[in-house]
Amino acid sequence: MSTSTITRKGQVTIPKEIRDALDLTEGQRVLFVRRGDEVVLKVIRGNILALRGSVKPSKRPENFEKVRAAVKKKLASRVVSNG
């Protein structure tokens, strides 16, 4: 079991053994999923192209803020369901 300390800015270093086990590299994104009193860290793999077609346009012109929010929600849902 590994531990880490929360900094003044709320940052935490992921221990090297965990980074190595999950094949994490600098700049990679992770998702934090709250499950009651626990938090699960999920690695976000893939890119925006993997979500192509997951959000259907509703009207023109598109509200891209809403589209971005829908894509983020869909991505988070896929990450959670694959873990």
Image (spheres, rainbow, N blue to C red):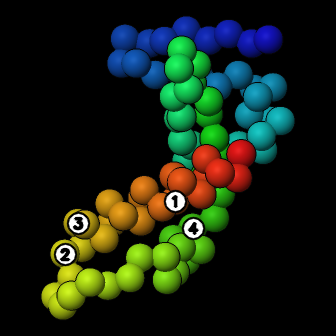
Q: Quadrant of the C terminus?
A: top right
The label shown at residue 63 is 2
Whether tag 4 and tag 1 are in contact, CB under 8 A, the answer is no
Residue labelled with disc 3: 65
Q: Residue at x 58, y 19 (%)?
A: 38
Whether tag 2 and tag 1 are in contact, CB under 8 A, the answer is no
Q: Is residue 37 above or below residue 29?
A: above
Q: CA distance from mark 2 to mark 1?
A: 19 Å
User: How far across and how far down the image is residue 54, in percent?
Assistant: 49, 76
Q: Residue at x 18, y 90 (%)?
A: 60
Q: Is residue 28 visible?
A: no
Q: Amino acid at mark 4?
A: Asn
Q: Amino acid at mark 3?
A: Glu
Element carrying mark 4: loop
Mark 3 Cα within 10 Å, few/some/many (few <14, many 20+)? few
Q: Amino acid at mark 2?
A: Asn
- How many numbered marks, from 0 up? 4
The reply, left or right, for residue 53 in relation to residue 61 is right
Residue labelled with disc 1: 75
The reply, left or right, for residue 74 in relation to residue 59 is right
